[in-house]
Every structure is written in structure tokens, then in C-alpha cells.
């Protein structure tokens, strides 16, 4: 940008998983470091970036349909730049500019750090720039980031995946697992806490296999314990662990580290051992349920959620019934349920026994009905219980009309609460911490309609009120060992409800 040139405004549209959300924070950080500014609501940006997902079957149609709607804008304003990145860009590569020649830049999952340079090159050369690397150029967390939340942040511990699940396209798009060094992770967490962040979620495609690259199978449990020594860090979560890599030391670390939340999201995918073999999921239903038993023995208050795929090729009614049986026994607090989606390039896409849509839909409806009933029963058990909430922003769609606010309990449950009572200190803000009593349990949320029992104003709340979001520089350090965990005071209540 020249001195007299107005800053270019950008907008990022993110599709898909938490990895993509976090990558978009990195993209925003780079763009702002290069002189761009976020576009304000209702204005036409100078740059639109799509960070895409390739997991669902309709991802392609959604992207190309959206790009088609932008063609008149590009014709009317040739200076508008459009960039496409993420998993679908990694998969489709040059096909994107063939189908949508008005796109200026295409970049992959391994080179998100190249975006500002590619945009400048596309402007200079007046032609599309396509750069797709086959392996990681720079670990994303070494790049600057503009965080979306003042109170909660993602922190990547690894990227990529070493598994070969037959339904999943991610390993071919994100590559083999690469682990960050422990010191880099902890330095990033400390930097976030220094900016007022209260909660971090450790991210990895198979987060609990962290350490495989440097040969320490106990590394993830050590990392959780190390997070427990960071002053000011109130909540630690992680997603998503793989059942085959889940070890007792991680359960011990969750139970014994006060700021690690008693919440576990662990994908089941299917309750049928035969289908799990076809999926190349290296565990069986009994192993999965044994992990849940061990977690609940150590943390009786733990909330456990999962992912389930319905209608995998060859799934029989008997196979599906096995899934229902496991769900009934596991008693998940909630589940993300998906109808199998054929993805070109995956082994499952060419398997025999692709099921008719109506069969998959009927089974899906039965699963959702069962899980909703379980979720409701489990949530009703919490009525009358005192909960601590980290007040959230934008999670209660009906908050304005109900005069409520929303927050997350330590076990991850969403609670809509009334921000009233003598303990309220100058108004409740996102990022503040409150305590209240649950008065109603619904299948997908809780309600707390009494006066607050306590209200603690926080620096995160100050930042949210001022419209400030953390901006973190990339973190790169050496590879220290974890060492023996520092002595910690005995937990008072842990991360329990």
C-alpha cells in the first residue's frame, strides 16, 4: 500500500471445521499485517477470501454457486479480488479458475502464508495465481492471527492426519501429521492469556496422538498438565481425540488438572464392528465404551459428545441397530450426526452397497430421535444444579426477545440465563464469568431464569465491550522437554458442574 492509498478492506467467508475457523484467523492476521482492514457491515469489500471445506458432498456446488453470484460484482468492479483457499482448493486446484475464471487467487492448505504475496502478484500480472503445495510450507501457528473472540481461542497442536479412514478426504488434503513443539504451543497459550483470553481449545485432527512425530506417546497428557500451570488460564478443552490413541494418562491429566474441562468429544462414527473395519477405524465398540467407563469413573460429571455417520456403504439394518445400541449405552450429552456423503478420491466412494437416500434418511431420523431423547433426559438431571458460565457472544439466537444472555458451562453445555440480580456488577458482558442455577433442561440447551449467584468482570469482558480482539504474532521456539510438572494446589472443584 502506498502512503496515499486507502487501505483495502477484506472479508473472509469460512466453511467447515474448527481447523478452518482457526486458519481463517491466521489469514486475517496476515492480511492486516499487510495493510488490509476488515470490511465493515453493509460495505463492499475490496477482497473476498473463501476458506473452503471438502468434507461434504455439496461443498463443490455451494462454492461454485457462491462464486457465480459474485461474477456481476467482479464485472462491475474489476478491482475486486476473489481468493479461494482451504481443502476444496487443495482438491480442485486449477479447476477452480477454469470453472470461475473471475477468481484471482487459489491457494491450498499447505501455503496459507502465501496469500498476501499471491494477491499482489495477481494484481501486478493481471491474471489468476494458483499455488498448491504438496507439503506444509510454514506451520500455520508461526503466522500472525487476528482472533475472533476476546475470551476463547483455538491453539493448534498438530496439523494433518496419519490415519486412512475410508470415508475421509482430509489426509490427502492436509497431509501427514506434523506436531508443533511443546514450547511453541505453551508460548502461544501464554500470549493469549496475556491478552485476556480465559479459555483455549487445543486443536488437532487426532489431537491425542500428539507427540507421534517426536516419539513421545505420553506427550498429550503432559501438555494438558503443562497448561494447568499457566496463571490466568481458566479453561482448557481439546478436540478431537481418536479412540484408538486414547490412553489412561490423558484421562488422569483431565481429572487431575484443575483448569482442564470435564468435557470429551470423541467420534464413534459407527457402533457396528463390521462397519468400523470397513471404515478402517482401528477400534471396536467395546473399546470405545470402555474408554467412556474409564472417563466417567475418573470424572462422573463429564459431558461426552460424539460424531456418527449413518448410511456408510454396505451398512445393514443389523449394523445400524448396533449403532443405536451403543448410543443407548453411551448416553452422549449430544451427538453430531451425519448422513454418509460420497467424496470422490476416497476408498468408500467406490465401495459396493451405496445406500438409497430414503434408507439413509429413515435411519438418520431414528438416530436423531433416540439421541434427542437421551440428551433431554441427561439435561433434565442438571436442573437445580449450580453452574459456572463463561458468557458467550452470538450463541443465543433468541436472547434479544427473551431478555437472556448465553454462556458455556465448564462441561461445554450451552446455557441461556437471565443477567439479573443484586450480584450483577455494572452489566454482564461476553467474556465475564457468572454463576447461576439451572431451571430447565431442553434437548440442546439449558435455561437458568433466576437471579445470578455471582458475577465476575474480567479483562476479556473489558475487551469485548471495547470491541477489541487479540492479535497474536507467530510463535517459534526451540524444543524444550516438558519435565516434571510443577507442584499444584489441590483442586477445589476442577472443571465440573
Image (cartoon, rainbow, N blue to C red):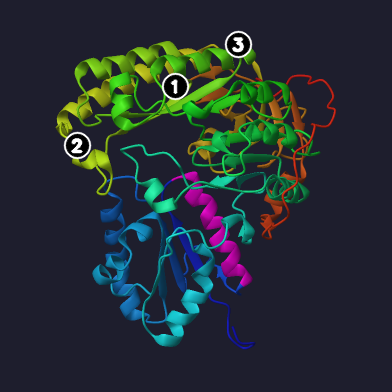
Alpha carbon distance from label 2 to label 3: 40 Å
User: Label 3's element?
Assistant: helix
Q: Is residue 41 magenta?
A: no
Classed neighbour count for the residue bearing mark 3: other residues with Cα under 10 Å, few (<14), some (14–19), many (≥20): few
**Residue designated by label 3:** 297
**Foreground: 102 or 431?**
102
- At which x and y percent is residue 38? 56, 66
Q: Is residue 448 above or below residue 15?
A: above
Name above or below for residue 271 compared with residue 278.
Answer: above
Q: Callout 1: helix, strand or loop?
A: loop
Badge 2 is on which residue? 351
Q: Position of residue 205 (x, y in %)?
A: 49, 41
For the residue labelled by badge 2, is the local secondary structure a helix, a strand or a loop? loop
Q: Is residue 104 above or below residue 15?
A: below
Closer to the camera: disc 2 or disc 3? 2
The quarter in which the C terminus is drawn is top right
Amino acid at each position: 500500500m502506498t502512503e496515499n492509498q486507502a487501505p483495502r478492506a477484506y472479508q473472509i467467508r469460512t466453511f467447515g471445521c474448527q481447523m478452518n475457523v482457526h486458519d481463517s484467523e491466521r489469514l486475517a492476521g496476515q492480511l492486516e499485517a499487510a495493510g488490509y482492514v476488515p470490511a465493515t457491515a453493509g460495505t463492499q469489500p475490496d477482497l473476498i477470501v473463501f476458506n473452503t471445506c471438502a468434507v461434504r458432498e455439496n461443498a463443490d456446488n455451494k462454492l461454485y454457486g457462491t462464486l457465480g453470484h459474485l461474477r456481476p460484482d467482479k464485472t462491475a468492479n474489476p478491482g475486486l479480488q476473489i481468493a479461494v483457499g482451504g481443502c476444496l482448493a487443495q482438491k480442485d486446484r486449477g479447476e477452480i479458475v477454469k470453472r470461475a475464471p473471475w477468481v484471482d487467487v487459489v491457494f491450498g492448505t499447505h501455503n496459507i502464508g502465501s496469500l498476501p504475496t499471491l494477491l499482489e502478484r495477481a494484481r501486478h500480472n493481471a491474471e489468476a495465481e494458483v499455488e498448491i503445495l504438496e507439503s506444509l510450507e510454514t506451520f500455520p501457528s508461526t503466522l500472525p492471527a487476528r482472533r475472533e473472540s476476546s475470551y476463547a481461542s483455538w491453539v493448534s497442536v498438530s496439523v494433518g492426519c496419519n490415519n486412512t479412514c475410508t470415508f475421509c478426504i482430509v489426509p490427502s488434503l492436509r497431509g501427514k501429521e506434523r506436531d508443533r513443539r511443546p514450547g511453541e504451543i505453551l508460548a502461544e497459550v501464554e500470549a493469549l492469556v496475556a491478552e485476556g483470553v480465559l479459555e483455549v481449545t487445543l486443536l488437532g485432527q487426532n489431537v491425542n496422538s500428539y507427540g507421534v512425530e517426536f516419539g513421545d506417546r505420553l506427550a498429550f497428557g503432559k501438555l494438558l498438565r503443562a497448561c494447568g500451570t499457566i496463571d490466568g488460564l481458566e479453561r482448557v478443552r481439546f478436540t478431537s481425540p481418536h479412540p484408538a490413541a486414547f490412553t489412561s494418562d490423558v484421562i488422569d491429566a483431565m481429572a487431575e488438572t484443575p483448569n482442564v474441562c470435564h468435557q470429551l468429544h470423541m467420534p464413534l462414527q459407527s457402533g457396528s464392528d463390521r462397519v468400523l473395519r470397513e471404515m478402517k477405524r482401528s477400534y471396536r465398540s467395546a473399546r470405545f465404551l470402555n474408554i467412556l467407563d474409564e472417563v466417567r469413573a475418573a470424572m462422573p460429571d463429564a459431558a461426552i459428545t460424539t460424531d456418527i455417520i449413518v448410511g456408510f456403504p454396505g451398512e445393514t439394518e443389523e449394523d445400524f441397530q448396533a449403532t443405536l445400541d451403543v448410543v443407548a449405552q453411551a448416553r452422549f450429552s449430544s451427538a453430531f450426526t451425519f448422513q454418509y456423503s460420497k467424496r470422490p478420491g476416497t476408498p468408500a466412494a467406490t465401495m459396493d452397497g451405496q445406500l438409497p437416500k430414503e434408507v439413509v434418511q429413515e435411519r438418520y431420523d431414528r438416530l436423531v430421535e433416540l439421541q434427542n431423547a437421551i440428551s433431554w433426559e441427561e439435561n433434565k438431571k442438571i436442573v437445580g444444579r449450580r453452574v459456572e458460565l463463561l458468557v458467550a457472544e452470538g450463541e443465543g439466537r433468541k436472547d434479544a426477545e427473551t431478555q437472556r444472555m448465553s454462556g458455556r458451562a465448564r462441561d461445554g453445555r450451552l446455557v441461556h440465563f437471565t443477567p439479573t440480580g443484586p450480584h450483577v456488577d455494572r452489566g454482564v458482558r461476553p467474556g465475564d464469568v457468572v454463576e447461576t442455577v439451572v431451571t430447565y433442561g431442553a434437548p440442546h440447551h439449558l435455561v437458568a431464569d433466576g437471579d445470578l449467584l455471582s458475577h465476575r468482570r474480567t479483562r476479556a469482558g473489558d475487551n469485548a465491550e471495547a470491541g477489541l480482539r487479540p492479535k497474536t504474532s507467530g510463535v517459534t521456539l526451540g524444543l524444550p522437554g516438558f519435565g516434571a510438572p510443577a507442584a499444584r494446589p489441590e483442586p477445589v472443584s476442577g472443571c465440573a458442574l
